[in-house]
Amino acid sequence: FPVTIAGTVLKAGEPGVVLDGPGGYPQLKVGDGETSWVDLPASVSDAILTSGFIPARIVTGFGIDPTGDEDSWAAIQAMIDDAASSDYKNIYFPVGVYAISAPLVIGDGVRLGGAGYSLSEIRSIGTSPQILKIEGDNVTIERLGFNQQSSASGSGLGLGIVGSSSSSNTQENVTIDSCKVFNTTNNAIRFPNAIKNLTVTNNLIYSCASGFSAYSPLS
């Protein structure tokens, strides 16, 4: 992870850190591709530092809309796919609402986090059947809100967070911590197939047709 030199122009969304920030603490910075040293708001920087989200891809640094007015599915999914195949697997959602029209599919090793489940919300719109589909192993989801606002309903539809769809392989090492899932017409969190080392802690589920289910937990 780069310690950025003063005057450097960071690429759009590229993370950097200065070791002698305010009070002598490290301060995270994110590039816009044009100017040097584009500071993150202090509250966002603090949240990343205290959560261990260094290095992290900051979604708003890649031009992703934090207002919920635009469908950001394609841009967020592209970032997740790139993270799964690279060394920079942490993706951070600053305060805001991020609208998606299709499920976000999460691959191996990806870690999604936000500023808090009431502050960073991923909102499903349109007819998206789920919000997140966790297909990979070694995945962590934390401090994010998931709002199922799509019109999808019926068997297997209107879900919040869903585990691997593969019945032939055992999914491993998935953590969902300090998240909020609401407004689902089906399970808030569902793992339909075999999974080993699943941790679901400190989550808030409300206004959902049903809560948590894991059909074939191994541990």
Image (cartoon, grey):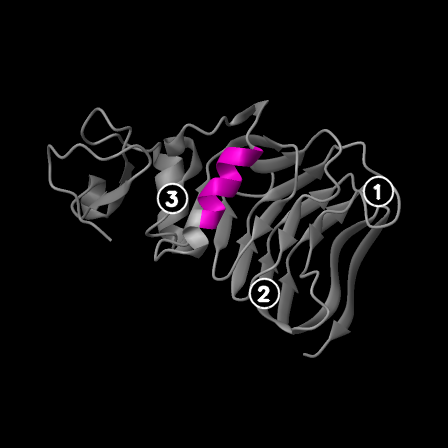
Q: Which residue of the protein is positioned furthest toward the right in this rendering?
A: 154
92 is higher (above) or lower (below) than 62: below
Residue type at mark 1 is: Thr
Please tell me which residue is depicted at 39% across the width and 52% down the height of the picture: 53
Q: CA distance from mark 3 to mark 1?
A: 32 Å
Mark closer to the chain start, 2 or 3? 3
Label 1 sits on residue: 185
23 sits left or right of 140 in the view: left
75 is higher (above) or lower (below) than 26: above
| The magenta segment | 73-81
159 is higher (above) or lower (below) than 121: below
Label 2 sits on residue: 174
Label 3 crowd (10 A; few <14 / some 14-19 / many >=20): many
Q: CA distance from mark 2 to mark 3?
A: 20 Å
Please tell me which residue is depicted at 57% across the width and 35% down the height of the picture: 73
Mark closer to the chain start, 1 or 2? 2
Q: Is residue 127 visible?
A: yes
Tell whether label 2 touches label 1 (CB within 8 Å): no
Label 3 sits on residue: 57
